[in-house]
Image (tube, rainbow, N blue to C red):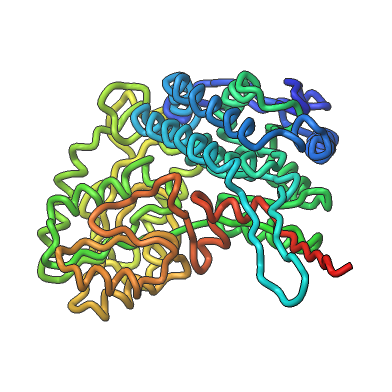
Amino acid sequence: MYIGGEWRDASGGEKHTLYNPATGEPLASVPYASEQDADLAIETAKNVLTDENWKAMDPSKRGLMLRTLAKLTYEHAKELALIESQNNGKTIRDAMGDIRFAAATLDYYAGWCDKIEGRTIPVAGNRLDFTLRQPLGATLHIIPWNFPLQLAIRSIAPALAAGCSVIAKPASLTPLSLLRWGKLAEEAGVPKGVLQIITGSGSRIGSYLAKSPLIDGISVTGSVETGASVMKTAAENITPVTLELGGKGANVVLPDANLKRAAKGICFGIFWNAGQMCWAGSRLIAHEEIADQLVELVKEEATKWKIGVGTEEGVRIGSLVSQEQREIVLNYVHKGLDSGAKLVMGGEPPKDEKLQKGAFLQPTILTDVDPNSVVVKEEIFGPVLTVLTFSDLDEAVRLANDTDFGLLNGVWTSNLRAAHLLARELESGMVSVNEYPVTFPQTPFIGWKKSGIGAEQGELALQFYSKTKNVNINFSF
């Protein structure tokens, strides 16, 4: 682990073996932190906030540091992608995209370091009133396993840009790319104590860190259950949180859409990363006039997605993160079929003998689903697409909004009026028209309903990692 600028084992010497989910082979051993290690990480993160090397660092120098780290992340993208593919099961192609996006995020926030400004406010009398924006403090980052490095950097970058210190707690299954990146942070000149990377059990160490009254802010990307648990814990200390949780995204396809283009986007939105995405387009809501044709096009496109070990050439669908996760997904498929759904394709592991030791699953499409079935209502987190149909826009909106989640929805149409209408009426923090999914470092990543609180990415993220102070000066003396 990386605490206080030093690489160390867990204080109790406990280790955890990680396995490549595509092959079942042992991959690495990492420390399993104790409460003593967590205390050290918290103490270090708090102390560095008063260290002049960090507190008084010129913001432009902080920006240069982040830009250097972005450059190093780009330069080591292939190495980091290989580590992530072996640790997570995703394809090298997907991992490379993730790492490059992470580097772009660092580069974006590097430009913000000397632009975090207050404002002057006109008030009565001989007074000057203005605001200061200052670092939030010591921040805890609880990171999921589906995009291990990209989602870590998504919250770490704005925290560092704002002048905070960081304790990063990666998922116990997938810490390796973040640990390797920590060495790049050293090389980029991140001062000792500013960044801690602590590995171990989420239920034990993640919860222990979140309970600390010394933590000034918590960023969580994970399940609704994890977010609710952390939020409840944080409430005891009035610790602010930003939560990016689950999703049940819908792709609403109108009859005037470019169906071939829509089919490609729908496949990308549910089969990319083996469907293990909070913003997955797991629900296809198609107009009844084109539903059958569109499903055939999606099926045709999905058959082109080669399944295999992520490090192999041409593979589009890698392994799920674990055998346990595959069983969860298969259980959902069986429940969908039991409730009357029709299996159009997939629904089981691939037959290829070479893939039997991995946690692979074929891309799966279910039609004729009951709108109240668990496969429509609950987040599956796997390569499973359910299909519903509608007859008019009001019905499409009702079906799309009939969920506890509200992260990303997609709209496919050539009708500008319909696009704007649906973008306004869909109950989600993000709407994408004629492509899915898409985001950029500079655009806010926002969840409504049970999909989250607050925003990641863009300028809005900096608001969480900085606190505002109002100053009033009366100069009538």
Out of 426 and 476, give the one closest to the viewer: 476
Out of 228 and 362, give the one closest to the viewer: 228
What residue do we see at 37% from left, 22% from top? Answer: 311
Q: Quadrant of residue 294?
A: bottom left
What residue occupies the far bottom of the structure in this picture?
394
Q: Is residue 391 above or below residue 230?
A: below
Locate the N terminus and report the quarter of the image it occupies.
top right
Q: Mark yes or no: residue 41 visible.
A: yes
Residue 182: image location, x then y, percent:
62, 26
Out of 137 and 286, give the one closest to the viewer: 137
Out of 414 and 389, give the one closest to the viewer: 414
Residue 391: image location, x then y, percent:
18, 77
What residue occupies the far front of the structure in this picture?
477
Q: Quadrant of residue 276?
A: top left
Q: Mark yes or no: residue 323 visible.
A: no
Residue 262: image location, x then y, percent:
19, 54
Left or right, 232 with respect to 184, comes to right
What residue do we see at 60% from left, 22% from top? Answer: 188
Count of labels in the image: 0
Residue 469: image location, x then y, percent:
74, 60
Left or right, 391 with respect to 438, comes to left
Q: Quadrant of residue 368?
A: bottom left
What residue do we see at 65% from left, 56% from top? Answer: 118
Left or right, 303 with respect to 196, comes to left
Locate the C terminus and report the quarter of the image it occupies.
bottom right
What residue do we see at 70% from left, 42% from top? Answer: 164
Q: Is residue 442 above or below residue 37?
A: below
